[in-house]
Image (cartoon, rainbow, N blue to C red):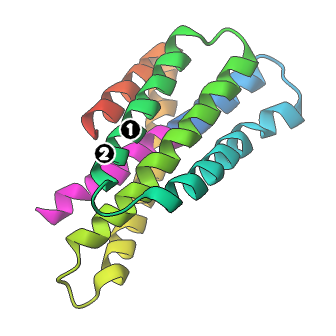
Amino acid sequence: MKFVIYLFPVMINFIASGVFFYVTQRFVEAGASKLLTAMVIPTWAIAYCISNMIIGKIVKPANAARLIVYGGVIIAASALGFIFLNQQLFLLLAWTGLLGIGFGFYCSSFQVWCRELEQNSSSGIAMATGKYTMAWSLGFAGGALTFGLLNAVLAFSVCFAVGVLVAVGVT
């Protein structure tokens, strides 16, 4: 059953990877400068880092599950923003930043929660970290590919509707 839990970071990183692909593509299609286009991932990363530093000070095994839910809600909210408020590039950057904040809540808390799952294991934190990293990487690989395939045949908003469903599903 523990293995199923590690599908959560697969799915949550699926969203991030898809967002990075699709938002960057939207910037290119809109004729944005190379500098502005290059700001997509750093916008997410800065928000994620700041959120991680804050959440890292308050997350404990007792509140980790609740913070995971908050992260999922924030991630779903950013996906809804991508669907309904996406006409201006600065809004796409704002939603990307909000996604980073949601990831800070979700990922930091999830790692604490996973550590608790592996506490009886002889490898403890090493096993939890290895499984989490594997799952994270699989999600990252699948997200860009899936969003790219969806984009080839469906509308922009469909990609983020998938993101909303995934975020709600892992929350």
User: Residue 3: within the magenta?
Assistant: yes
User: Which residue is more in the foreground, 20 or 75?
Assistant: 75
Q: Residue at x 41, y 58 (%)?
A: 59
Q: Residues within 10 Å of mark 1 (few under 14, many from 20)?
A: some
**Which stretch is magenta?**
1-17
Which amino acid type is shown beneath numbered disc 1? Tyr
Image height check: is 58 above or below 122? above
Label 1 sits on a secondary structure element that is helix
Q: Is residue 58 left or right of residue 1?
A: right
The numbered mark at residue 149 is: none
Residue holding disc 2: 66
Q: Position of residue 78 (x, y in %)?
A: 51, 26
Q: Residue at x 84, y 23 (%)?
A: 32
Quadrant in which the N terminus appears: bottom left
To which quarter of the image does residue 14 belong? Answer: top left
Mark 2 vs mark 1, CA separation in Å: 6 Å
